[in-house]
Amino acid sequence: MIEFAPGNLRVPKWTRPVFMVAAGTTDYRKRYPEKKLEELCMMAFRMLLEENDLKLDPLEVKGLINFASYGEFADHFQDQLLCEAKVHDYLGLDLLPNVGIKTGGATGGSALLVGANTIASGMSDCTLVLGWERMDEVKTWTGNYYISSAACKDFETRLARNYASYYAPMARRFQEMYHVDERVRAAIAVKNRGYACHSPFAQQPGRHTIEEVLKGDIVSDPLRFLECCAMSVGSASALLCSEELAFKLTDHPVRFYIASGSHTLRAGDRRPMRIPLLPHETEEGYRWLYEEMKKQDGRWPGFESFGATRFAAYMVYRMAGIHVPIEDLDLVETHDAFTISDLQTYGDVGLTLYGREQDYVTSGECYLKNPHSGRPGKCPANLSGGLLGTMHAVGATGIFQCGEVLWQLQNKYDKFHGDPAMWTRFGKKKPADWESLQVRNPRRGLAISHAGVGSHVTCAVLEKV
Amino acid sequence: MNDRVTLRTSPSKIDVVNAAWVLHFPRFGEEGTHYHTYGQLTPYFKGLTEGHLLATRCTNPRCPIGKGKGELWLPPRADCPDCHQPMVWEEVRDPHGYIYAYTYVERGGTGLEIECPYYQIDVKMEGVGTIVKSYLLDRRPIRIGDKVRARFRTGENATHTCLDLCFELM
């Protein structure tokens, strides 16, 4: 049992608000021999400075930067320690201070968390947050071994050396506990890979069917190939500012809130505890779930849920004044490294109740257009294409997700995804059946950056002002 | 294919430094070997090679969670996370439990020593607070709830790693 002392549950109180004004990205590829890592970072930096309709010239904007927060998942992949120094120098930001942040799959989110704190504290008025990963220097199965170094080396890494095999038991347990039809997981893969078809940045777009997903080769039972993200190369960036500077740079700044949580590296070490309640939840509302858990020797968060995600959501909703997530949020980017992690997360962030995640996905509210009603879904998920369809260049991922939410809130989905020149830039042709995935007048979005089997998670809320 | 899972590995070399086992983990030949200590968890790994499953328990009466009779930790840890006092070792007698979660691993990453395909299983054992990840010797279809008992790679068969603990269906 974990019990919090009241002091542990203090909600973060920033001394001044934080804003996001611009974002940038490369496209994402399994292999990217055309560009060195720092050259990819330059692409993401230039897009941030040059293509976000900022009111100052790119070099004037650069002249405002006080600090850089960099995200890189694994030195193993880059085979380069202190990569931050190479990138920082290459972007022409010496002698400004920078830090490198590492929290596994949540690295991008954590880099944003650190960047936001430099603004909130007054240390910086303008902070560059930029992340990257180059996963193509090694063969895929060696990459899988490297990633499984993010399982416990004493007790777990030798039991698979493939990260899908640490998610698969959670999928199996979740399926059993909540009687999940695996077609629901498959539908998530179909949706996100389908949305990726409209993104020029996407690595694995595809118009698949549920049957095709389920007939696919198994990576680690029950997860099929199309349910798992791929090795990825690319970079993403975001610019965080103080309020005064934000309005100097753009008429459409977005308010930025972020909080984090953490949990054990080994899922089996998660001790049972009471569910920390979100503003719209009650103990009474979960009485049935605790009863159900007793019948199945279940526990919270157990293998079914992510305590770190719940903790981060608990904090960020209170920071951002989110009372009823499904009403207050207009879109979400989940960390869909595997279909199961997408499914599990809807309960953690309170878009539905724990135990009702499957119903939430089948309700169609996580689609841009609800396939049942034909009306807009209440909170479309992963319109970017997500990790399954578009990218998981790990250190960049959390930053890319927030960039996509920023552009949605600024009504710029079409500008960044629909311009034929953007497709040409990456050697692609805009599809004839391209569709805009712009949410209609969104006000708030959520982005979840997630590591390990839930070891580190950040939840960011972006809000149009 | 055998109906029993086997390993494709040879025993890892160990140094015994005072009471600790230090595992040799070659990366780039002899010169590029990592020397990884099991530190105060050495009794656990040594125990496996002798056919014993050792866990730890907090017995500090002032521990806010365990209150002097905490649950068993497996994997063990030397210090209690709740009161920070050293825990005590205790053998799990006749170690058995049931499959709490599992996956059938069709393919693993580079260097995997377990012969694919195999079941990676999470085992819930009575009296143990945590759920132990391991692998199953059997290849026939399984379900959550199936009962399993621990098996050990001992003596000359020992790898000196977590692979020395495995399970078989009861």
Image (cartoon, helix red, strand yellow):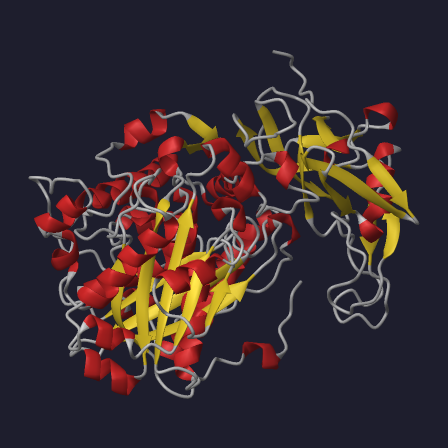
Residue A398: image location, x then y, percent: 38, 59
**Residue A256 falls in which quadrant of the image?**
bottom left
Q: Is residue A433 left or right of residue A463?
A: left
Q: A187 or B126, which lies in front?
A: A187
Q: Nearer the viewer, residue B94 or A244?
A: A244
What residue appears at the point 78 percent right and 68 percent down from the top-left corner? B84
Q: Residue at x 52, y 66 (%)?
A: A261
Position of A266 with respect to A33 (left or right) is: right
Q: Which image quarter is the C terminus of chain A in?
A: bottom left
Left or right: A177 with respect to B113? left
Image position of A256 with respect to A34: above or below: below
For the point 60% across and 19% down, which residue is it?
B140
Residue at the extreme right of the image, as rendered: B18
- The location of residue A2, given as percent across then percent down, is 65, 65
Across and down, in percent, residue B72 comes to 78, 52
Query: Taking A242 as reference, is B10 above or below it?
Result: above
Image: B111 above or below A87:
above
Q: Quadrant of residue B32?
A: top right
The residue most toward the top is B1
Residue A258 visible (yes or no): yes
Q: Position of residue A27 (x, y in %)?
A: 26, 48
Q: Between residues B111 and B130, which one lies in front from this camera angle?
A: B111
Query: Quick one: quadrant of the N terminus of chain A?
Result: bottom right
Label total for image = 0
* Residue A281 in view in this figure: no
Q: Looking at this rendering, what residue extends furthest in the left direction?
A: A432
